[in-house]
Amino acid sequence: MPKTGPGKRRRYVVSQAKLARLRERLISEATDRLSQPRAFMSFVGVAEADELLNDIKGHPHAFVIACIMDRQMSAQKAWRIPYELKQRIGSFRFPRLAELSLEQLERVMAQPEPLHRFPKVMSRNLYAAIRRIERQYRGNAAEIWTGRPSSATIVRRFLEFDGVGQKIATMAANTLVRDFRIPVSDRYSIDISVDIQIRRVFARMGFVPEDASTEYIIYRARELHPEYPGIFDLVLWELGRTVCRPRRPACDDCQWRELCAHANRKGAH
């Protein structure tokens, strides 16, 4: 059972030796994935929408806009918005977007049904993003990440967009580096993107308490792998979605069960 007591956080306990081995194996697994050729990314499971998001050469702004939309709604719905906008306005070429006024964007985002939970706010964020890409990046959003910039530069550039916080900015940088194989000069500033899946798996493995704050988890990942803290994202996220479920985790089917604190707790077998 998790360790608890007065003034103590609820935590699954495992030896430091097992944690060290688990850390090394997680990093090795993620590093191996990074060495593989780039694969087509399925963001929303709709072919046309995913094709648009994967086209970071022809439509780099689609990826940026999807990141901006990923706020207070399911990621799958948010990342489909560029495709839905394309259907409504007929094209998603940047010159076409740049033609639209704020009022036109508000109408397109809201009718015939809202594309986002907060269509007015997100319309303003979208309009501001189009203006920033137009003026700062000469209409080419790929300039955000071209030229082997530092990871801190990419994160900072995403933070400059209205509505984008640290979690989305680092998630965007990590997706570019990990999934699109964008070359960067370092990976130090790509933090782990803490969501419900990563929080649960990191705690069950024994790396952090169950009630750890987002900041605690971020700094723990930095401690574990300062060269690239976000390297844990994909492995942990996939594990949380498939095997390490909130209820009845399939520990017997998990490749990490030998070293995992939750799988080896008293009475688990």
Image (tube, rainbow, N blue to C red):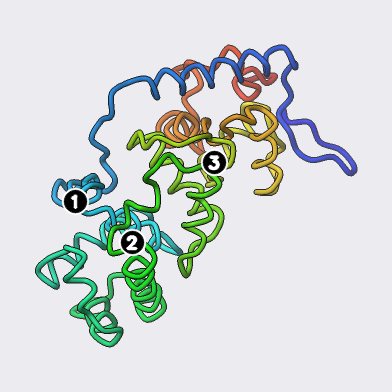
Kind of residue at disc 2:
Ile
Mark 1 or 2: in front is 1
Going from N to C along the chain, the mark reached first, 3 or 1, is 1
| Residue matched to label 2 | 65
First along the sequence among labels 1 and 2: 1
- Disc 1 is placed on an element classified as loop
Specify whether 40 is left or right of 130. Answer: left
Q: Give the foreground label among 3 and 1.
A: 1
Q: Identify the residue under disc 1.
A: 58
Rendered position, 210 above or below 80: above
Which of the image's four quarters has the N terminus? top right
Among the 4 quarters of the image, the one containing residue 69: bottom left
* Amino acid type at image mark 1: Gly
Looking at the rendered structure, the secondary structure element under dot 2 is helix
Q: Which quadrant would residue 242 be assigned to in this image?
A: top left
Q: Quadrant of the C terminus?
A: top right
Task: Residue at 18% x, 69% y: name it.
Answer: 95
Figure check: 138 above or below 38: below
In the picture shown, does residue 1 fall above or below 147? above
Q: Is residue 248 left or right of residue 74?
A: right
Task: Tell me how far mark 3 sits from mark 1, CA to CA.
Answer: 25 Å
Which residue is most to the right?
A: 6
Asked if residue 124 lies left or right of residue 37, the reply is: right
Most extreme residue toward the bottom is 103
- The amino acid pointed to by label 3 is Ile
Q: Residue at x 9, y 69 (%)?
A: 90
Numbered circle sitting on residue 190: 3
Marks 1 and 2, how far apart in space?
Answer: 14 Å
